[in-house]
Image (cartoon, grey):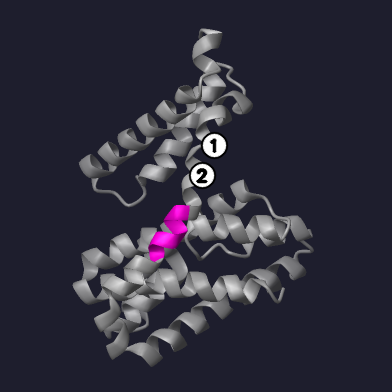
Amino acid sequence: MPDALLSSPFFGLTLSAAAWCFGCWVQKKTGLLLCNPLLIAVALILAGLSVFGIPYETYAIGGDFVKLMLGPVTAVLALNIYNQRTILKENFLPVLAGCLAGSLTSVGSILALCRVFHVDQALTASLLPKSVTTAIAMGIAESHGGVAGIAAAAVMVAGLTGAVFAPLFAKRFRITEPVAEGLAIGACSHALGTTRAMEIGQVQGAMSSIAICVCGIMTSILALFL
């Protein structure tokens, strides 16, 4: 490829946008949760860079512009809580209790497993925020000496796992309360799980959406004491 093209920030931006759009198209056509646009986009970008022998640093000239949006996106999550304020008021205590339990379980399980398997501090910090949305997870990981890329991958795996298995677990443990089901999905599998929760029911989707924001705040606070 021409050096002028590769050295332009538009190369990374265009590649990222094209891969994402293709991922959205595949998911829409197949309807499969495993065909997540983010997962497909990452695979396509990695494959393209590998096939054409393009260094990651070259892609990052434009691709890193996407990271600049993580801060504003995190702030926009507050709007989601505001839009769901009626449901939040009606279920304030259950929301706080459920999100606190989910955040403590997520953080505690990672710390326990990492200590059992003698995982180093950097990897532990990267895996710690696996159950919150990517924007918050990357910030938490980097502030504790972790790797943002590993944190993003862990978030993706947690989200896909929750989106696929959440209905099965709800049925297995006989969770029929919409509020409880929605909080559980949002607390452990963030945006990807919320997409699935919205398909299950309106209340589940709303509660899962609230859980994303509340658990993100709680996990950020818990991380300060680790």
Mark 1 surroundings: few (<14), some (14-19) or many (≥20) residues within 10 A: some
Q: Overall secondary structure of the magenta stretch?
A: helix
Residue drawn where x is 37% and y is 63% of the image: 193
Q: In the image, is 52 to the left or to the right of 223?
A: left
> What is the span of residues highlighted in magenta in the rendered image?
72-77
Q: Which mark is residue 37?
A: none
Point out residue 102 in the picture as x, y percentages from the top left corner: 50, 78
Q: Is residue 162 visible?
A: no
When the figure is inspected, residue 218 is found, relative to residue 190, above or below; the finding is: below
SS category of the residue bearing label 1: loop
**Of marks 1 and 2, the one in the foreground:** 2
Q: Is residue 124 visible?
A: yes
Q: Are marks 1 and 2 in contact (CB under 8 Å)?
A: yes
Point out residue 69 in the picture as x, y percentages from the top left corner: 46, 47
Pick the front one: 121 or 116: 121
Residue drawn where x is 55% and y is 62% of the image: 130
Q: Disc 1 to disc 2, how far (Cα)?
A: 7 Å
SS category of the residue bearing label 2: helix
Residue drawn where x is 51% and y is 73% of the image: 217
In the rendered image, the residue lying farthest to the top is 2
User: Residue 23's image quarter?
Assistant: top left
| Residue under label 1 | 64
Q: Amino acid at mark 1?
A: Asp
Q: Which mark is residue 68?
A: 2
Q: In the image, is 214 to the left or to the right of 125?
A: left
Point out residue 156 in the picture as x, y percentages from the top left corner: 48, 53
The answer to if 108 sits in the magenta stretch is: no
Residue drawn where x is 44% and y is 86% of the image: 96
When the figure is inspected, residue 30 is found, relative to residue 107, above or below; the finding is: above
When the figure is inspected, residue 207 is found, relative to residue 125, above or below; the finding is: below
